Image: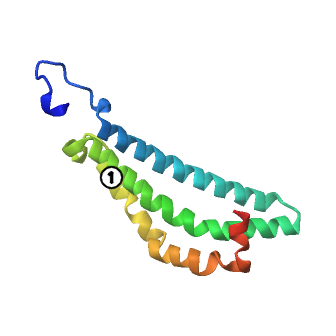
Amino acid sequence: SPLCRDPSTPMVPIIEHSDVKRMLLLQKAYVEGALGLCMYTAGVIDALATTADAAARSDKLLLLELLTPVVKAWPSEWCLEANKWAMQVLGGYGYTQDFPLEQLYRDARPNMIYEGTSGVQALDLLGRKASMGDGAALKLL
């Protein structure tokens, strides 16, 4: 138990701490989820550009319209959160100039502003995109 730890035992590497593992796994999940979402959407764009069938193109376009607000809002918000966890892993040391984390955070922060607020993207998604064609895009997803 942490309360009964023997001070004569060797220090545990930071990666062995359960909370650090949790933060690293959160970062991994956020970043890989965002990458997967962006790659899936890019695949829909590629399919839209290469599909000759009009019905298939219509389906791809509908799906792309549904995915666009998600791709704009989710990575810009949650990858910034991943950067926050990266700084937390390093503790106070994450704010020094020795690591680029603080600069990456400052560089990533405006993405939410550029892509519109998450609330606006949510309104677009649920107010317009999800109900288009009687929910046809959601059925395609």
Say which of 102 and 32 sits in front.
Answer: 32
Does residue 30 appear left or right of residue 101 in this picture? right
Report which quarter residue 18 is drawn in.
top left
Residue at x-position 81% and y-position 66%: 57
User: Is 122 located above or below residue 17 in the figure?
Assistant: below
Say which of 140 and 97 sits in front.
Answer: 140
Which quadrant holds the N terminus?
A: top left
In the rendered structure, which amino acid carries the disc numbered 1?
Answer: Lys
Residue at x-position 77% and y-position 57%: 47
Count the numbered circles shown: 1
Residue 15 picture location, percent across and down: 32, 31
Q: Which element type, helix, strand or loop, lies under badge 1?
A: helix
Does residue 139 appear left or right of residue 37 in this picture? right
Residue 17 picture location, percent across and down: 28, 34
Residue 117 picture location, percent across and down: 44, 73
User: Is 102 located above or below residue 131 in the figure?
Assistant: above
